[in-house]
Image (cartoon, rainbow, N blue to C red):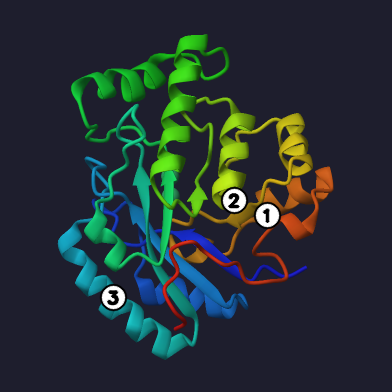
């Protein structure tokens, strides 16, 4: 069983020292671990502390070209966008698709939401509400936000679903399946019950294994996810980056 690519990694372009390494360092570790492809997916533009700046995109592209040449690893440029509105808005705009090879989206705290009401509902309610016993109202609101985002945007991967933002997992996963969106099995945290994972697998949901590395040495470190796959005997043909390279909705041409 071989992991072909890691599609959720951060570098110094996530601000305030949140990501530790450079793009070249991430790619070098990927090369040493035998990966064929990685994605650089910094925190979205509306993250108040860690968000990447749009003005850095040009420098990122140059770093990617250089790192590709040095390592031979194929490197996709992406972003880990934030859900910023209960109406499904995320923090990418149309012109961002000119540079995006891959679009990830997940819930994060400390973001600039679309409206003040959204801040109360998406950030504060989830920050101070119970992670285990969310009110039905909160659960419905979170779920609707994700469903609407999936409907509005060509999202390749939903990252760490349910982390800090409980949803109706199966409803989100089914919509993801319809839209060609992958559900991430995050190398650091999996916020699904075994039953939820097994049901998603039975429903034909496609998964991707990612490290969510914030430092180069963690690139390709997905043991938590891989152990879960083996423990539950999840079908490997539904894990898009094990023993094969995935196809993405936003990928433009070949590199
Ligand atoms: Zn994240
Ligand atoms: Zn991340």
Image spot of residue 249 (x, y percent): 48, 61
Return the mark for residue 61.
3
Q: Are marks 1 and 3 in contact (CB under 8 Å)?
A: no
How crowded pointer 1 is (Cα within 10 Å; few <14, some 14-19, many 20+) is rated as: some
Residue at 41% across / 84% down in the picture?
68
Marks 1/3: CA–CA distance: 30 Å
On the rendered image, what quadrant is the C terminus found in?
A: bottom left
On the rendered image, what quadrant is the N terminus found in?
A: bottom right
Looking at the image, tell me whether mark 3 or mark 2 is earlier in sequence order: 3
Looking at the image, tell me whether mark 2 or mark 1 is earlier in sequence order: 2
Instruction: List the residue tagged with mark 2.
Output: 187
Q: Are marks 2 and 1 in contact (CB under 8 Å)?
A: yes
How crowded pointer 2 is (Cα within 10 Å; few <14, some 14-19, many 20+) is rated as: many
Residue at 43% across / 63% down in the picture?
250
How crowded pointer 3 is (Cα within 10 Å; few <14, some 14-19, many 20+) is rated as: some
Image spot of residue 150 (x, y percent): 46, 42
Between circles 3 and 2, the one closer to the viewer is 3
Instruction: List the residue tagged with mark 1.
Output: 223
Looking at the image, tell me whether mark 1 or mark 3 is earlier in sequence order: 3
Residue 36 location, quadrant? bottom right
């Amino acid at each position: 069983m071989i992991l072909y690519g890691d599609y959720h990694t951060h570098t110094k372009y996530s601000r305030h020292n949140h990501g530790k390494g450079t793009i070249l360092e991430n790619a070098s570790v990927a090369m040493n671990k035998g990966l064929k492809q990685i994605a650089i997916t910094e925190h979205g533009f509306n993250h108040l502390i860690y968000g990447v700046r749009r003005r850095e995109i040009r420098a990122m592209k140059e770093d990617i070209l250089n790192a590709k040449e040095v390592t031979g690893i194929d490197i996709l440029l992406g972003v880990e966008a934030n859900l910023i509105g209960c109406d499904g808005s995320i923090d990418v705009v149309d012109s961002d698709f000119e540079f995006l090879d891959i679009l990830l989206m997940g819930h994060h705290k400390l973001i600039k939401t679309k409206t003040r009401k959204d801040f109360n509902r998406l950030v504060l309610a989830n920050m101070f509400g119970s992670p285990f016993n969310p009110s039905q109202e909160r659960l419905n609101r979170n779920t609707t936000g994700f469903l609407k985002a999936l409907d509005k945007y060509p999202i390749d991967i939903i990252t760490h679903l349910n982390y800090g933002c409980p949803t109706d997992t199966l409803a989100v996963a089914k919509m993801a399946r319809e839209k060609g969106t992958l559900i991430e099995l995050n190398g650091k945290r999996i916020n699904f019950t075994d039953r939820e994972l097994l049901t998603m697998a039975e429903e034909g949901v496609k998964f991707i294994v990612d490290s969510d590395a914030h430092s180069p040495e963690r690139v390709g470190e997905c043991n938590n996810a891989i152990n879960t796959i083996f423990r539950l005997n999840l079908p490997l043909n539904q894990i898009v980056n094990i023993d094969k390279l995935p196809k993405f909705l936003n990928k433009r041409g070949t590199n």
